Amino acid sequence: KYDATGQLVSTERVVVESQKRPNGAVVNATTYRSDINGQMREAERRTIESQAQGQVSTTDITVSRPGLSGSFDVAEKRNIVTIADGKTVHETEVVERPSEAGRFAPVAREVREQGTTDGKSTAITASYEPDYTGKMSLIRQQVATTTKAADGSMVTELDLYAPAAYGVARSGSDTPKLKEQNVIVRREKNGVVTETTTVSRPTLQDPNHLVASGPPSELVCTGKCAGPLQP
């Protein structure tokens, strides 16, 4: 680990032990981190238990860290359930952390779904967190659809939703509002990949009307260009 000036301030070492089971596996990962004197000390214990049965697979992750007394306490639990049925994959991840009362309570939930129908790929991600009442409420959602255009380019429409659009007061309605739309056109020619992105947002006068927030941006890549391009 380095600081802002590029100086090494600490080092980490991760020891991983894995054990296979008839329908899954157990992985124990222990992280050691150096202190100011350069001594390696145990900083985290992570246990990952996974199992699969038919179309359903489950992963339970337990993270323990040293408390004020120096003994290790469970700091976080994650449960991931994945259901794959042919062309669709549905995944739900729940994160729990200790509350003030000492009990584990959900602090985040993410629901993901991916599928392909008639040549169109769709990926939906919805994120939830507790609101002021303690109820898990939607804080953001994104819907990405990708299709192949007649000229061979891949066109992805990414819609970003939130409880309220930019500059608009939250109404308390459970219906998410479209706050941004990105249209990404990816072209490949002679070993060169070009991605052009147009960003549109609703106006304050009409939250249902989208206008471009600026000129399109463009990224160019040569060589190995798998996945979305990064600036």
Image (cartoon, rainbow, N blue to C red):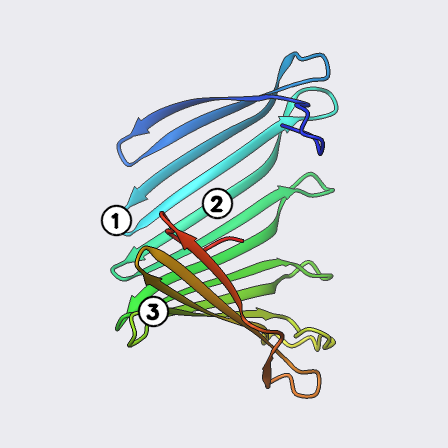
The amino acid pointed to by label 1 is: Gly
Give the secondary structure at mark 1.
Answer: loop
Residue 79 numbered tag:
2
Q: Where is residue 166 shown, x and y percent of the image?
A: 69, 73
Labels 2 and 1: the sequence-earlier one: 1
In the foreground, 74 or 9: 9
The quadrant in which residue 16 appears is top left
Q: Callout 1: few (<14), some (14-19), or many (20+) C-alpha neighbours within 10 Å?
A: few
Q: Position of residue 214 (x, y in %)?
A: 62, 74
Which amino acid, by three-letter code, is at mark 3? Ser
Instruction: Looking at the image, tell me whether mark 3 or mark 2 is earlier in sequence order.
Output: 2
Q: Residue at x 65, y 77 (%)?
A: 173
Quadrant for residue 169, please give it. Answer: bottom right
Q: Disc 1 marks which residue?
A: 54
Q: Which of the two discs, 1 and 3, labels the residue nearer the N terminus?
A: 1
Lateral position of residue 210 relative to residue 56, left or right: right
Q: Secondary structure at mark 3?
A: loop
For residue 177, side relative to residue 51 (left or right): right
Question: CA separation, marks 1 and 3?
Answer: 37 Å
Q: Residue at x 55, y 54 (%)?
A: 109
Q: In the image shown, does 219 or 162 lie closer to the viewer?
A: 219
